[in-house]
Image (spheres, rainbow, N blue to C red):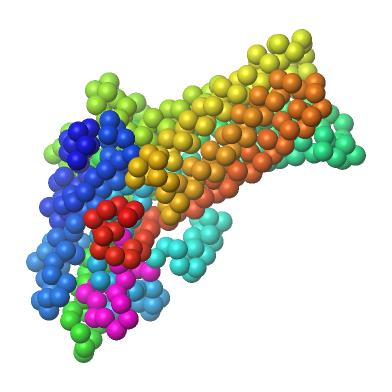
Amino acid sequence: MPARNRRFFTREPFRNDDRLTLQHAEGPFRFLNPTRAHFDHSQLCADATSNKVATPQESGDDVEARHEPPKHVAESNVPARNIRFLWRSRDNRKGRHPLLVQQARAGEDAPFLAPRRSSHPKEIMKTIIKTFTYYPIWDISWLVAFIFTWGSVVWVINAFFVWLPVAAPSTEFNNEITDGGGITAFIGAIIFFEFGSILLIFEAINANSAGCFGWAVEQLVDGEKKGSPKLRVVAAHRHCHHHHQNKRNLVGKCSSATVAEARPDSSSADEKRQWQWFPSWYELRTHCLHELGFLAGCAQLFGATVFGVSGFTALPGIQNHLTPQWRLNAAYWIPQVVGGSGFIVSSSLYMLETQQKWWKPAPKLLGWHIAFWNLIGAFGFTLSGALGMAYNNSGAQYEAGLATFWGSWAFLIGSYLQLYESLNKHPVEEVSSMKDFTTVDG
């Protein structure tokens, strides 16, 4: 294991959970903390061919039910040959609990039952509907995604105001660019980008450090007459102690419905403080500055703050009075370039956080696609600012507005995917072979 990655053990997830054992940890950079790790569950790693299956009481596993599952739950179960729990820093920060499942072959008597994969059309549709009907305002990860989604909508409207009059002059109305474009730029930059970026920092410094399994392992009781007994793995919401479980406020305390064994260890000083507005200097030096998610959030906040200058100077009565051109460049266009560059750095770091190697893309992961589309949007906004400094040129004016247009749509795609991610707390990923259990992403 790389030298820097050994420091993972100082704050190793599940260090107090005897059921979960670290199998493999890695990250894209050796000098930063690992971003992913495989964990073996004591009961799930038992001899799958054995006819003797330990009862939940004997294994100490979390059990929510031992009776026949509801019909809709039973229909979503699939036979599995192997199951492993996967910890990823991004998923942990978002309150998600990824599960790796290897499906059984046709006719094989599999020892496990697991939920069907998250990429199943029915599961995708359920989560899409949830994005329009469920509003967990107590979940900071959802709030971040919700704010960025609406901010992106505002920027799409802004792009129509600044680009459409140039592309189709007949559609322009009085003061469309200065008033419509200026006001929407202010709202998008100040209210949405800045506020959402601040919440990203809070999300990063309050990421669950103890580890949260988030699943229950149950002995299946279904009166089967054939085959060996099975274990079923189901989502265990009452056993989760991520911040989103507290529905009363944003300070991340355990929900009153959280069962006792899932609550953080009260004897640990690290666990007593369940929410913090600012990390201590010691924590900043030894942990936060080695976390890709925290570094990416800092780059995002820096970019949003500088970009906010151009949002303020875009207001009617300010931008149209910034003359000569060098004043407009200094107060409006250059902050766009610098702020957009901060977004590029942030999106790149978020992409790297999801990757096994710094050079190896991870297109199978939702978090990678979120960062990818945000990276495209960041390039669009940066290019718009760079072209804006030659705004007296009609061609540059057209391309600057166009860059804002496609950049805004890219941000909207990335933000909506992030909203989808925030509501999918128990992702199930299928793997094809045992090799995938020992080598992350093959």
Q: Which x, y percent locates residue 56? A: 15, 67
Seen as rendered, the residue at the extreme front is: 359
Residue depicted at x 54% and y 40%: 374
* Quarter occupied by the N terminus: top left
- Counting the numbered discs, the total is 0
Q: Judge whether residue 287 is colored magenta.
A: no
Q: Quadrant of residue 398?
A: top right
Give whichever of 221, 76 is nearer the camera.
76
Can residue 248 be seen here? The reply is no
Question: To which quarter of the image does residue 411 belong?
Answer: top right
Image vertical order of residue 323 relative to residue 267, above or below: above
- Residue 37 shows up from this direction: yes
302 left or right, relative to 325 = left
Eyeballing the image, is 212 above or below 51? above
Classify 417 as above or below 126: above
Q: Residue 17: horizontal and vertical position, in percent?
A: 15, 50
**In terms of depth relative to the viewer, which is nearer, 7 or 210?**
7
| Front residue of 15 and 442 | 442
The image position of residue 237, as x and y in percent, is 32, 58
Q: Is residue 105 magenta?
A: yes
The residue lying at 66 percent from left, 41 percent from top is: 406
Name the side, left or right, on which 342 lies relative to 249.
right
Q: Tell me which corner region of the image, top left, top right, bottom left or bottom right, holds residue 275.
A: top left
Task: Read off the magenta span.
Answer: 100-116
Q: Position of residue 8 (x, y in %)?
A: 21, 37
Residue at (49%, 63%) from the top-left corner?
A: 124
Residue displayed at 54% across by 44% down: 373
